[in-house]
Image (spheres, grey):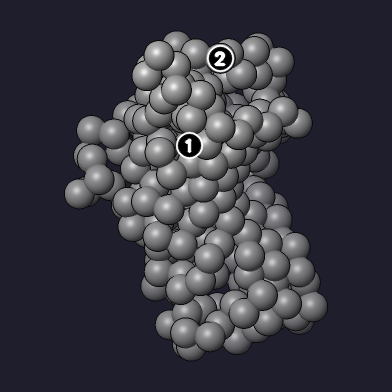
Amino acid sequence: MNDFFSPRDVAAFVDVEDFLVNHPRIAHLYIYGVELPPSSKAVPRPGFQNLISFDAHPLYIIWIMNTLVLSPNALPSLQRVVISSENYSHSNGKRDFDYPLFDLGLEAIATFPRSIVLALTFNCKSHIENWLRSHVHAGVETSVISRLVHTNTLSIYDSWSEYTEGMLAIIPDWLQLFPALKHLKFEREAQVNMKKLVESQYVATVSLLCQKLETMSVNRETFDLQLIRKNLDNGAGD
């Protein structure tokens, strides 16, 4: 169970931006629970030449990607982006995290011109299945996921709770929407989820539905999906 609640905005956005501008050598940056950028049009001041990985609320993902407005060669070192939900305490008067905000973050990442690792962190456990299902219903012609042509590796982080049967069932269909995905990683999985994700039937389903996927890892166990598909094809031919 994840009790990592977001406090009230512990730092103003202008202070966060000033800190980052004055620390240009930062390579790995994680932002959580601070005031959000004032607008989706906000553009960072020049910098971030050394930034390798960035983990933040989706509105901060938009903000950092707006650096590309200044120059297509901005963020030259960036290799990994993590979109994280925040887990709000109801005692603070805040509602559950709005997962459609992830779509805005993904739209920003879709503009990145080079190969990049994408990770999704589900800190808030409410409404994830609805968000996944909305993309499956939208399909490849509409879902922003179909535009992530530079995303070859996807990591999914959560360790809080048991997946619902509906969420487990929809994940393989959702994964099909990624046009260039080769490597899938479920990281920091709760034991109860790990048992379900590594079941042979589930791994086989993912391998058959997601033909471009080469590997699937669940915590430290890795499956060669190409080999599994080959064995399944040979078995079907017997």
- Of the 4 image quadrants, the one containing the C terminus is top left
The quadrant holding residue 47 is bottom right
Number of residues whose C-alpha sits closer than 10 Å to that of mark 2, classed few (under 14), some (14–19) or many (20 or more): few
- Of the 4 image quadrants, the one containing the N terminus is top right
Name the residue nearer the viewer: 182 or 160.
Answer: 182
Q: Residue at x 59, y 77 (%)?
A: 75
Do callouts 1 and 2 mark residues in contact (Cβ within 8 Å)?
Answer: no
Q: Earlier in the sequence, mark 1 or mark 2?
A: 1
What amino acid type is highlighted by mark number 1?
Phe
Can you say whether 148 is above or below 200 in the image? below
Image coords of residue 190 (percent x, y):
69, 20
How far apart marks 1 and 2 lie (CA) works out to: 33 Å
Q: Residue at x 72, y 28 (%)?
A: 221
Q: Residue at x 69, y 71 (%)?
A: 51
Helix, strand or loop at mark 1: loop
Q: Residue 200: which numbered mark, if any?
A: 2
Image coords of residue 15 (percent x, y):
68, 70
